[in-house]
Amino acid sequence: MEVSMFLNTLTPKFYVALTGTSSLISGLILIFEWWYFRKYGTSFIEQVSVSHLRPLLGGVDSSSPSNSNTSNGEPDSNRQSVSECKVWRNPLNLFRGAEYNRYTWVTGREPLTYYDMNLSAQDHQTFFTCDSDHLRPADAIMQKAWRERNPQARISAAHEALELEDCATAYILLAEEEATTIMEAERLFKQALKAGEGCYRRSQQLQHHGTQYEAQHRRDTNVLVYIKRRLAMCSRKLGRTREAVKMMRDLMKEFPLLSMFNIHENLLESLLELQNYADVQAVLAKYDDISLPKSATICYTAALLKARAVSDKFSPEAASRRGLSTAEMNAVEAIHRAVEFNPHVPKYLLEMKSLILPPEHILKRGDSEAIAYAFFHLQHWKRVEGALNLLHCTWEGTFRMIPYPLEKGHLFYPYPICTETADRELLPTVFHEVSVYPKKELPFFILFTAGLCSFTAMLALLTHQFPELMGVFAKAFLSTLFAPLNFIMEKVESILPSSLWHQLTRI
């Protein structure tokens, strides 16, 4: 009865003031929550409830804080924002004639973008030409051929150069673009090797006679290294893996300074095919150094080797009961390190996204690198029992460790924001959806506060526009809300003696 009298005395101005005040308070809480989340990557209300209220209520927090100040991936000088994304030649790029064109014949789709092929043309002009090419007719023709956009024009120019003399770069172009099988490409590369070795020996003797001869020797060296590498890749594709490993090792010993070609990544893939994990570890020990640039091949191969030691017996249920052993912890940390470097790879390894043919150029830490890695290494992960299961159980935990926003890093320098734009240029977006960096989801309390703020603001607006109608609705709502309480009070009043009820109301 008293509640009804109180509600009847309330005026519409009271409801306007009530909803306006609650809307203002909700808005302030929302602004504070958003600022705190942007700065620290977690909800303030959620953190307080978990850290302070949960222990008071008897809850136990089994998670231990991660050490986000340690660095075992990159030097401090690399922890600055990357101003631009550098595109790298894919160490395992396919043959344009024998593989990319075959895909086009079968599907009718173009696997390579114009941007990607234009970068390859620039690479060919950089590595396979020099300023003195105009002095030799065949090389002069090839200098023009590498600039041609039409594939048939390039092939015709290569045949024209071969009519004049045995030209190594002409054989390279035919092996890459005209050969329709790997065996045919290997035959042309062997002819290129014979011509390339002759040019290399001649320019090696004259390299100190002037800058012109030095540039020519540098060009001949690049040509020879390229031919030997592609011959090793032909052997790998034709199943002669041990022969390919020997060719790669000899090439790395003969030209140890040409690390920019990343031949060790070809070697790692071939050693994994042979399941020679001891040699894989030896190569990683040399190239997974703090001063050397990382790649998905380096990081994920290191994770695979550590996962191999524990994955066959790993069980999420058992690990949650007894905790992680030292070996399991090392494997999980290696997976977290790899995922932080390139977060797009697990979706391809776990077959959550469809693979496409890798591009001829990749962007480190981007979707293009993830495709190139998974295309060749998925079979190696499947071969190790339980490795994909361990990856599936642990990879998403990486994003809880990485500070937010992306301007911060944990083991590596911050993730470059420009990767998405570059990947869209490198990958055929017509039939492939480019992966982007996984966004951190907003905590429940921020969403709840935003909803509450919007709801109270709407109530304040409606009350201001229709005060009498909203007053009726408010009275009806509060009457309905307090109806069960009034019903209980009436029942208690009817059951208890009037004298006892009188004494209780006085209290």
Image (cartoon, rainbow, N blue to C red):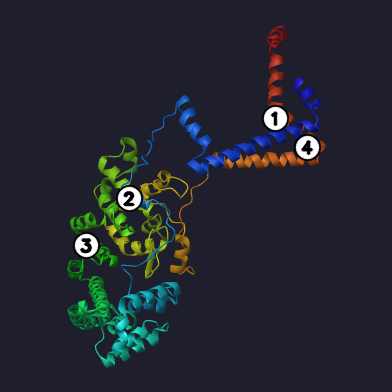
Mark 3 nearby-residue class (10 Å; few <14, some 14–19, many ≥20): many
Q: Mark 1 points at which residue?
A: 481
Q: What amino acid type should be assigned to the residue bearing mark 4?
A: Met
Can the viewer see residue 179? no
Residue 283, given in percent of the width and then of the height, sits at 21, 58
Which residue is label 3 attached to?
271
Task: Tell me whether the residue at label 2 lies in contact with that at label 1, contact meaning CB atoms closer than 8 angstroms.
Answer: no
Q: Identify the residue position indicated by label 2 in the image.
A: 75
Could you tell which of marks 1 and 3 lies nearer the N-terminus? 3
Q: Tell which residue pokes out farthest to the bottom in this image.
A: 163
**Kind of residue at badge 1:** Leu
**Which mark is in front, 2 or 1?**
2
Please, what secondary structure does the residue beneath circle 3 have?
helix
Q: Residue at x 38, y 33 (%)?
A: 62
Front residue of 61 and 29: 29
Q: Which of marks 4 and 2 precedes in the sequence? A: 2
